[in-house]
Image: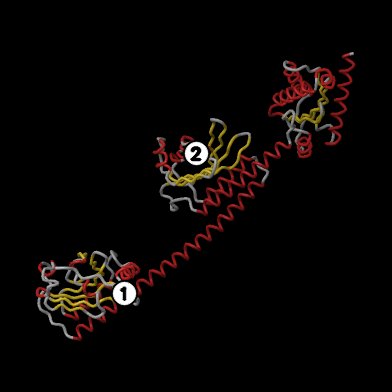
């Protein structure tokens, strides 16, 4: 026994079969009804809708036989698809093509077979509607016409099914497109919110924490925050936590980020399976956090900052989408620009020689003072010109640097020291008595004299309750020059 020959256009036939996506699909009522009707009209115990694949015959619906597949070499239907007209085998045991066929010599013991090919609109024959009997069963012309009519209904159902599938895919694509547009709109709004936050007069850390919280909400993240790295010190601050996130899982990602060195990523990093990465690196990770996004957000003297966003294993979005990445990276760039601007502004307020605040910073801060009481002091270093003339400007510059650092350290958080120009300094401090302020100045003088000669400092102190802003500065200046004259007379 040999199987049926291949049709001359077998490759195109198989492509057509694949187009309809029918193979290995579950039972469907419309095809079951057709085989029941075929068995009834043709009075046969067996009726089947078969599709002829590359190496097998697969049954979509059947009456009198179990579902399943047979090898194509044993397929009666493989002969039927060679022609457009029905194929009828009246006595299979006597037909040399089928006498030793296992479906003839064994179950279902086919004696009579009749099959009508399923001819698709493209002209390809992808399967059959067939009936069979285990005993002689003559068929009339009307029987064969009914079989062909039912086969045509199968073709119609296949076409309708394929159309519905294409329509469903199109609708799904439209829904996905609409959802993506909605996500884009929401993320554009989130990015606008990021820029608004960064435009506020906030400390960079506070601004970035607020940005991370906004991103966490926009991306439906489980956690979001910032990671700051300075040398070997790593600090993770979380500003967004999903309300239903178990408390014991809220610290998993920060610990893993540090252990895996993700806090040093020079470029945006998107991890879809954190436990797998941790396992490869030999780092223990507990909890269900799987997705981690690490976005560089700038560098300043306090270290390198990254935005951190995480999602759990059960998150409905299984990985970082292109839109997610675009939002995160745009936020990272905006954060970097803000830090750069803040740093540039900070450097513009610093004196290049001493490193403390400069005249510009004093003018800005003095103008911005509220009605809260404060103490103002003007300081002039005595003998700096003589030191420059006798020992050189390098020695004078050293003295200025040491005194400025010592004065700033003495004031601490109670006040700010500014280099007003040349050998003059200004202090704005919380309300202090004259003696208390002079104690700070004397301590700075003593610290300076350990490393560089300093004759002394003339100080003029004024309190905000004594005059308005413009007059207060003139008052402090006058008192400072009075002090300088007294000190000069004393030295004589």
Q: Is residue 239 visible?
A: no
Q: From what the image shows, is residue 444 above or below residue 20?
A: above
Q: Is residue 459 found left or right of 83 in the rendered image?
A: right
Residue plotted at (19% across, 86% down): 141
Graded by Cα atoms within 10 Å as few (under 14), some (14 to 19) or many (20 or more), the crowding at tag 2 reads some
Q: From what the image shows, is residue 368 above or below residue 320?
A: above
In front of the other: 376 or 259: 259
Q: Is residue 171 found left or right of 467 in the rendered image?
A: left
Foreground mark, 2 or 1, reads 1
Q: Position of residue 338 (x, y in %)?
A: 65, 44
Graded by Cα atoms within 10 Å as few (under 14), some (14 to 19) or many (20 or more), the crowding at tag 1 reads many
Q: Give the residue furthest to the bottom.
A: 141
Q: Position of residue 75 (x, y in %)?
A: 19, 69
SS under mark 1:
loop
Q: From what the image shows, is residue 291 above or below residue 356?
A: below
Q: Position of residue 129 (x, y in %)?
A: 23, 75
Q: Of the residues under marks 2 and 1, which one precedes in the sequence?
A: 1
Q: CA distance from mark 2 to mark 1?
A: 57 Å
Residue picked out by circle 2: 262
Whether tag 2 and tag 1 are in contact, CB under 8 A, the answer is: no
Where's the N terminus, which quadrant? bottom left
Residue picked out by circle 1: 124
Residue plotted at (72% across, 15% down): 450
Colour treatment of the image: secondary structure
SS under mark 2:
helix
In front of the other: 269 or 182: 269
Q: Is residue 87 found left or right of 351 in the rendered image?
A: left
């Amino acid at each position: 026994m040999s199987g049926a020959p291949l049709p001359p256009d077998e490759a195109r036939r198989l492509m057509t079969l694949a187009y309809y996506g029918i193979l290995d699909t579950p039972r469907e009522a419309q095809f079951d009804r057709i085989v029941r009707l075929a068995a009834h009209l043709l009075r046969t115990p067996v009726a089947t809708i078969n599709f002829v694949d590359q190496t097998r015959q697969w049954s979509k619906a059947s009456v009198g036989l179990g579902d399943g597949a047979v090898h194509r070499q044993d397929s009666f239907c493989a002969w039927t698809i060679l022609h457009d007209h029905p194929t009828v085998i009246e006595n299979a045991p006597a037909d040399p093509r089928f006498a030793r066929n296992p479906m003839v010599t064994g179950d279902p013991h086919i004696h009579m077979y009749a099959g009508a090919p399923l001819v698709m609109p493209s002209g390809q024959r992808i399967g059959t509607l067939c009936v069979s009997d285990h005993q002689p069963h003559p068929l009339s012309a009307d029987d064969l016409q009914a079989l062909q009519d039912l086969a045509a209904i199968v073709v119609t159902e296949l076409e309708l099914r394929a159309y519905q599938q294409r329509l469903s895919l199109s609708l799904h694509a439209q829904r996905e497109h609409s959802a993506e547009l909605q996500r884009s709109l929401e993320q554009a709004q989130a990015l606008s919110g990021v820029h608004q936050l960064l435009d506020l007069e906030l400390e960079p850390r506070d601004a970035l924490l607020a940005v991370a919280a906004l991103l966490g909400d926009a991306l439906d993240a489980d956690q979001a925050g910032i990671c700051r790295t300075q040398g070997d010190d790593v600090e993770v601050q979380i500003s967004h936590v999903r309300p239903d996130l178990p408390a014991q899982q809220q610290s998993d990602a920060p610990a893993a980020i540090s252990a895996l060195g993700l806090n040093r990523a020079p470029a945006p990093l998107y991890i879809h399976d954190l436990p797998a990465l941790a396992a490869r690196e030999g780092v223990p990770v507990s909890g269900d956090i799987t997705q981690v996004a690490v976005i560089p957000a700038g560098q300043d003297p306090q270290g390198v900052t990254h935005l951190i966003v995480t999602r759990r294993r059960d998150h409905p979005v299984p990985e970082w989408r292109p839109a997610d990445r675009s939002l995160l990276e745009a936020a990272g760039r905006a954060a970097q620009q803000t830090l750069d601007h803040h740093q540039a502004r900070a450097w513009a307020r610093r004196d290049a020689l001493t490193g403390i605040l400069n005249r510009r910073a004093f003018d800005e801060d003095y103008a911005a003072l509220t009605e809260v009481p404060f103490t103002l002091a003007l300081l002039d270093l005595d003998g700096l010109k003589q030191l420059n003339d006798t020992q050189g400007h390098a020695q004078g510059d050293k003295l200025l640097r040491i005194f400025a650092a010592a004065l700033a350290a003495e004031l601490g958080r109670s006040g700010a020291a500014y280099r007003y120009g040349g050998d003059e300094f200004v202090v704005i401090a919380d309300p202090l008595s004259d003696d208390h302020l002079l104690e700070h100045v004397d301590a700075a003088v003593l610290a300076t004299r350990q490393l560089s000669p300093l004759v002394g400092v003339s100080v003029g102190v004024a309190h905000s309750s004594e005059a308005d802003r413009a007059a207060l500065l003139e008052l402090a200046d006058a008192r400072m020059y009075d002090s300088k004259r007294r000190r000069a007379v004393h030295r004589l």
